[in-house]
Image: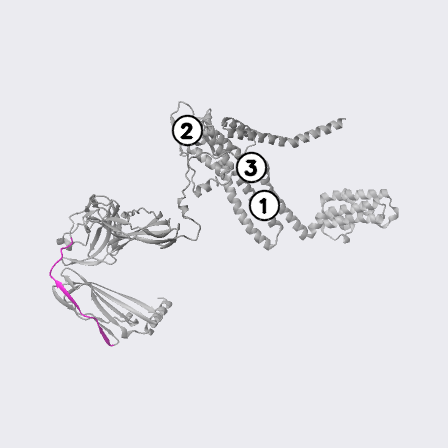
Amino acid sequence: MKRKLLLLLSMFLLCSFLFYPARSSQKISDIFNQANSLYEKGNFKEAISYYEQLVQSGKVSSDLYYNLGNACFKAGLPGRAILYYEKAMKFSPRNKELKQNLAYVRSLTVDKQFDEDGSIIFFLLSGMNGFLSINELTIIFMIFYFILFFTGLIYIFLPEKSVRFYNRIIASFVLFCFLISSFFLAIRIYDEEYVKKGIIMFSQEKARSGPGEDYTEVFTVHEGSKVFLRQTQGDWRQITLPSGYSGWVKNKSIEEI
Amino acid sequence: MFPLKKLFILITILFLITLPVKGENISIEATVDKNIITLDETFNLTIILRGGAELSVSNKINMPKLDNFDILSSTSYMDSKFSFSTSEMEVIKTLQYVLQPLKSGEFVIDSIEFHSNGKIIKANPIKITVTNTTKPTVSVPTFVPPGAYQIPSPSTYNNNDYWCVQEVDKDNVYVNEQVTLTFKFYYRNRLYQEAHYQPPDTTGFIVTKLTQSNVPSIEKMQNVKYYVDYVKHALFPIFSGKKTIGTTILNVPGGFFDYSTLKSNEVNIEVKPLPSEGRPSNFSGTVGDFVIYVKSDKDKVEINQPVSIEITVEGWGNVDAIGEPVLPHLSDFKSYPSGTSTDSFVKEDMVYSQKKFKYVIMPVKTGLLEFPEISYSYFAPREGKYKNISTKPLNIAVSEGTGNISSSSNTQEEIKITGQDINHIKTGSYVLKSDTSLLYKNIFLRFCIFFPPLGLCFSFYYKKYNDRLNSDIGFARFRRAYRKAMINLNKAKNIMKEKGNSEEFYSFLSRALTEYIGDKVNLPPAGLTLTDMFFILEEKQVDKEILELFRRTYESCEYGRFAPGGSGEENMRHALEMTEKIIVKLEKYM
């Protein structure tokens, strides 16, 4: 009897394990479709809440951020729309529709947005930002890394001269590609880990010379502006504009990308 | 002198001597740059000798007496050409004299003679007329720059070694009219180093360099001979009003590291604005003397096919001031500008400019179409009035064409953007795949990073070990000794289990021991006696107890092999256990 009960319990656990993801996926798909239909009906605020449920569940994608950005823009939240578009851009930098939407919403903001320099030098120094996502760069890096490993194995186990000759040529090329991809990946990881960027969420925010209301106003930033985030002190955060000017704004007025 | 150099000179001389001499074809020619001059003027007498290689080694010219002239300078140079087709060498020798008459009147420079191979070749005599009329002397500026050499007055020329002056060809001009600025540097003695020229301040002018003297000319003032260098610039005033061309500075070398600064006078110019009276509506700022013409790359074309049109405005004047011609309304063509190109060069101390305006036109209907004449206006400063010029009309035959492009395509328009909004949302289940986690943070991926270097190290050592096993027999035997001994023991065990031949059983035990020791020290096991093995084990510092155990076990194995009757199963098991125990213990020492 005890044995039968144990078997039944095992079967139940196995079924739960097998069918849970499908059920979970079904549920997520339902929420997503519901959010889309709300968007289509013009009920943007409710669509946002559904999309955000998905974001909180962790099942996110660049397309979800894109839809969420659209819904925010239609709901009159351009700052939030830019934030989600920027998040999506990290993972789909070549998505044309995304680029267009971001450019369009940026063009409607008060502050002049800094255009990233389109020169080849800037492109290389930014680790091919805007062309390859950080995940794509990681995959490329890993592919070259493992090819390099295999050329090493061939070198050790196949001592024939002709094989070694061709292997050396391939290994040199792969090593070059590997070094280039590592260089770009290092830049992007540094950018991801140490260069924090944020979007201003309030329609108007006064930046002060220090972390407090008593400090002098140094400049005013408006909703949707992209800024670099520095240190935090209490409720205040230091921001730097692309032009180099620094100031302190309230923490709640910024969202990190 | 190096022997090689000597040899080269010798060969060159021999070559010149052996060359066919055009002695019979030697000619001499004497010319002057002007026949009628004043007393103050100088003239150039040039003698040109043409002939073969012998001209390069002989110099037998008889100059006539030049009592009525003062020879101010003389130069000579030679040029030679070798023709491979005729294997002949032609040498041209030029002698140049700068002469100044000493008195007025009519003089004849007698024939100049050249002696060659006993023959006398004569040049034509030259007649020179010297008049009394004297030209006004060079205008002497009143400007005296501080610290500089004083600009000499005519009476003090003799007391100055060098001086400079700058002058313009006209001082009352229109905007964009050319003014020629000439800077002259006079010096009595040849300079051993070049003087450093610093151009004047010409703010408000567009400046183009015209010419400069390559060799100094010679001018005589108050019976003092001066070498003269000059630099000429074309200046085009941009704005009207009173303009000043600043001082030109010349650093004249004196001795070693010693320079004297020489400053010229300033020059004032009155720049008049272009008259507003009579200014044509199509006037675009061009000043000078110009012509206009148009050409096309083809005169037959299919409908809607491009034709390149080039309208050229060229003439005397500033290229930057040439404005674009105004195209008339083209009902039969669509026109698109495709760029401009400019060119300018100096001709007789004047700037000659050319500007090309390029267009691409596309005929929109068939038939013999006319590209109309283009009217263009410019201001002629010499006459002080505006002038109108025009191109000739161009005829272009336009056919229907082989393509299916109908004339209705002419009505096509570019799509107009009437509004702007964001792109629509994305639908479908594909959007739900999670692609926003950062791969470089993935634990598995980070683990994978360490795998290749470890794998490579392991592979390297494995390969080395394998190579040694294959190449070093002693090492291979050593490494395999224990395994081989265990195989022998297993075989013995099987014989014992199957109750087989006890001789064979003991034989395997004995072999296990001898082969193990033989393999470990790389010696053939067949030749190993108990004494040998004892000696080897003692060398390896094996414990005495184990040695004793080894001796007893080995002897019992030998006894079992050669006296089979007395061994029972119990004895066999004991011997097997002991042998295994000994090999395991010996493994620590070997």
Quick check: A59 left or right of A106? right
Distance CA(mark 2)–CA(mark 1): 51 Å
Mark 1 crowdedness (10 Å alpha carbons): few <14, some 14-19, many ≥20: some
Could you say which is closer to the camera, residue B580 or residue B464? B464
Q: Amino acid at mark 3?
A: Leu
- For the question of whether residue B484 can be seen, the reply is yes
Q: Which residues are magenta?
A: B118-138
Closer to the chain start, of discs 2 and 1, is: 1
SS of the residue at dot 2?
strand
Disc 2 or disc 1, which is closer to the eye?
2
Q: Determine whether label 2 and label 3 are within 8 Å by CB.
A: no
**Residue assigned mark 3:** B439
Are tags 2 and 3 found on a single chain? no
**Residue assigned mark 1:** A149
Tell me, for residue A222, which label it has, or none: 2
Find residue A160 and report its horizontal and vertical position in percent: 61, 54
Distance CA(mark 2)–CA(mark 3): 34 Å
Find residue A189 and report its horizontal and vertical position in percent: 51, 37
Protein chain holding label 3? B
Protein chain holding label 1? A
Q: Amino acid at mark 1?
A: Phe
SS of the residue at dot 1?
helix
Distance CA(mark 3)–CA(mark 1): 20 Å
Q: Amino acid at mark 2?
A: His
Find residue B13 and report its horizontal and vertical position in percent: 33, 71
